[in-house]
Amino acid sequence: MTKTSDIDKLDEVDHVLGEEYEHEPVPASARRSTFSVTTVWIGFPMIITGAMTGSILVLGMGFRNALWAMVIGNLIMFAYVGALGVLGTRRGMNFALLASIVFGKKGYVFASGLLSTLLLGWYAVQTGITGALINSTYGLNYIAMTTVAGLLYIGITFIGVRGLHLIGLVSVPLFVILGGWVALDSAATSGWNAVFDYPGNNGAATMTMGVGLTVVIALFIDAGTVSADFNRWAKDSRSSIIATFSAFPFANILAMLIGGVMTAALAVPNANPFGADNMFGYINGRQIGWLSVLAFLFLYCNLGSVCAHCLYNSATGWSRILHTRMRVMAVVLGIIGIVIAAGNVWAFFIEWLSLLGVLVPPIGAIVLVDQYLYRKNAEISEDWRPTAFIAWAIGSAVALIVEFYAPHFSTAISAMLAGGIVMPSLAGSRKQHEPRPDIRTGRGQLAGPVFPFNQRMNPYGRL
């Protein structure tokens, strides 16, 4: 099979399923409706893993403090993800293309490659969680169920952004119905007063607000940073913001609250949200045949949504880096993720959050400062942009210091603020030292006070 015939077949697939515009902006004619982009976003965080995170927050902080962390953290995410998403909408570019403007034609590989690899890790984590829950609940073979899940999720991703829309249409209603029932049914056992007054695991809150905010933010900070991958499909900024709002704060808070309410209501000592003490375990614990079957299907649909989103982001990023198609990378990376998931990598969930809280937030902050404040409508030009890398390094260093020496603060917020604050000073310093054309000769000169070299200027400033 020749390379030309391979390209022809890929072109045919793209023609049938739709272009993904990995290497160019999405044209206005290909943009999708507000409803379509909203279903893509709302189905991403409205997942069982979000409910598990809510349980962890409530166990560590008590219900009231955890609720504050959920609200504040998600509002921060809305501002962060919403602003990045609008950039993608206005330019029609995915994150890798935006990163090429900010970090350089060659430098973007580090930012986009890191995020795309972390998102592949999330795909593997969530696929592993699927297999683990099926194995522990129904006694089915872990490797077999993980493989089935991974292949299903690859299929959804292969369809493209339309596949993310379709899985959202199925996953969201199921989550709202089953999750709502779990929260209300569990709360009925103890009463809502007991839920709100829940003090934390074994009656003590051990997690600070800073750590709680990091947990909330870090859960989707990677996907939120590459939000342009989704929002580039929106028709205008209004549609982009509506779609983002459906995810942060709405869907993410709802998912966290369902897990948090259940945990507070049941008040199980030393509960394990990643074991049986989650909404999936609660549903199956009722030992109702049809409900268990529904829970089985729900698990695959629900985690299929987040896995497909993560794999889509990862494949979009790597397709740009390797100069290939998103669908090709979806298959390749999906298989790699299945192999990793079979090794029980999902058990390192918390370690992933810690890593993301340090390395990822400065990237988005740097993009925002660069594109909103200093270089609006800039194009891809330089190979490397050192200021962006210096700001990234400083933001990550600050977060590491906070992580080890001031853990009661939020590493994610510290990294975001440090990168965003440092970038303007670096950008301003560089701007001062950039060559400015000499009015008389056209040659570059260092920026500084400019005096009229020709006293015969007319009132309009022309020589």
Image (cartoon, grey):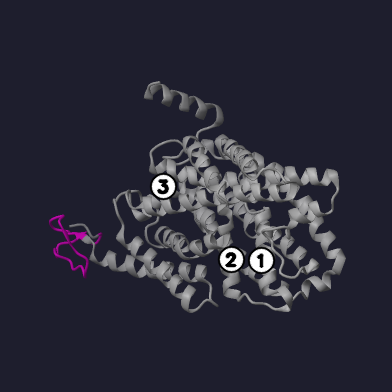
N-term-proximal mark, 2 vs 3 = 3
Residue 129 in percent (x, y) is at 63, 51
User: What is the x, y in percent for residue 225?
Assistant: 50, 56
Query: Which of pointers 2 and 1 lies earlier in the amino acid sequence?
Result: 1
Disc 3 residue crowd, few under 14, some 14–19, many 20+, Cα 10 Å: many
Give the magenta range: 436-460
- Sequence-earlier tag: 3 or 1: 1
Question: Which quadrant holds residue 460?
Answer: bottom left
Q: Residues within 10 Å of mark 2 (few under 14, many from 20)?
A: many
Q: Is residue 223 visible?
A: yes
Return the residue nearer the eye: 235 or 190: 190
Residue at left offset 45%, top offset 70%: 399
Q: Is residue 446 magenta?
A: yes
Q: In which quarter of the image is the C terminus?
A: bottom left
Q: Is the residue 396 above or below the residue 90 in the image?
A: below
What residue lies at 55% left-to-right and 52% top-to-bottom?
Answer: 122
Q: How far apart are marks 2 and 3 (CA)?
A: 28 Å
Return the x and y of residue 412 as percentages of the image width and height: 51, 67
> Which residue was labeled with disc 3?
97
Observer-nearest of 29 and 73? 73
| Residue 321 lies in quadrant | top left
The residue under label 1 is 56
Whether residue 62 appears in magenta in the rendering, the answer is no
What's under tag 1, amino acid-wise?
Answer: Ile
| Image depth: mark 2 or mark 1 in front | 1
Tell me the residue that label 2 is attached to.
215
Q: Do residues under tags 2 and 1 come within 8 Å of each other at their CB atoms?
A: yes
What amino acid is found at the position of numbered circle 3 in the picture? Answer: Leu
